[in-house]
Image (spheres, rainbow, N blue to C red):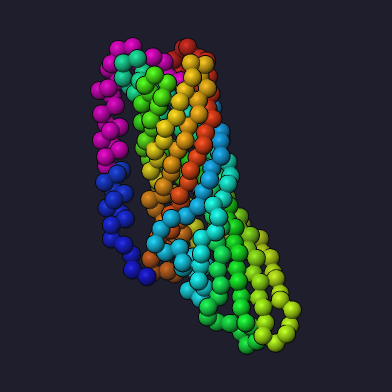
Amino acid sequence: MPRRAGGRPRFRVLAGAWLLLLAALPGAAQAPEKGPVKLSLKAGGTYTGLAGDDLKQLLGPDYTTRLGNRYLAYHAGAALRIPVSGHGSVALQPEVLLNLRGYRLTGERTAGLATGEKQCSVKQTRVLTYADVPVLANVNVAGWFLEFGLQFGFLVHARAETQTTTSYSTGVPDKATFVASTDRADLSSFDVGIVGGVGYQTLSGLSLGLRLNRGLTPLLDPAGAASKPRAYHDALMLQVAYLLPFDRELR
C-alpha cells in the first residue's frame, strides 16, 4: 500500500508554526496586569470514530470493511491557564486528560472462505485509553473563548471485542464466536493531533466548551506492513470545566 507523501510534511509545518508561537510567548508575557495562573478541572463526553483513506482495509485484505457508528466515551482531567497578555485575555493552556476513544467496524470476508462456508461477517468495537496532553492557545473575550493547538497522546490501554458470525451452505446452523482482547501490538503508542474549540465561561468560573480533535499520525502500525494504513482519530468533545477560585499565582 503506497504511503501518501503529504502527511509528514503537513505535520512538520503545523508543529513548526506551533513552536514559533510558543517562542513568541515570553515576549507577550511582558504585558502588564496579566493576572495569576489558574487551575481548572474538567470532564465531559468524547464522541469518537476514525477518518482517513484506508478504512476499508482495517480488518485485513480478505475483508470488506465499513466504519460503524461512532463511539461515545468520556474524558477527565485538569488544565492550567497561563496568561500572556494584558488582563489575561490570551493565555497558554496546557492540559492533562485521561481520554477514552473508540471506534466500531463491520465487515464481510470476501476471500479465503473454507469449503462449505457461505458468508463470514465481523463486528468489532475497540476502546483505547490515552493520556492526552493538549497544549493550546486560549483567547477569551467577554466570557466567550476560542482555543486551538496541538495534542500529544500516549496509549495506555486497549480493549477490542470482536464477534464473528459464519453461515454455511450445507445446512449447518450459523456459528457465532466472541473474542475479547487487550492486545495493542498493531497500534501506534504515540498520537499527535490538532485541536480547535469554542465555548463560554461564566464569572463564577463554570464553563462549557465544544472541541474538535483530529489525529495527524496513523492510528495503526501493523508489524510487517510496508506502510501504515491512513486511519486517524476523529473526535468531538463536549466539556464542562470549573476554574478553581484561587486569586494567588500558582508557582
Quarter holding residue 116: bottom right
Q: Looking at the image, can residue 177 be seen?
A: yes
Q: Residue at x 65, y 65 (%)?
A: 163
Q: Looking at the image, can residue 188 be seen?
A: no
Quarter holding residue 27: top left
Q: Residue at x 29, y 51 (%)?
A: 10
Task: State the image coordinates of residue 205 (x, y, percent, origin top left).
Answer: 51, 19
Of the pair 130 and 232, the residue shown nearer to us: 232
Quarter holding residue 179: bottom right
Of the pair 72 and 33, the residue shown nearer to us: 72
For residue 36, side relative to residue 169 (left or right):
left
Task: State the image coordinates of residue 199 (x, y, percent, origin top left).
Answer: 44, 29
Q: Residue at x 54, y 30 (%)?
A: 240
Residue 33, magenta (yes or no): yes
Which residue range is magenta in the image?
16-38
Q: Residue at x 55, y 55 (%)?
A: 69
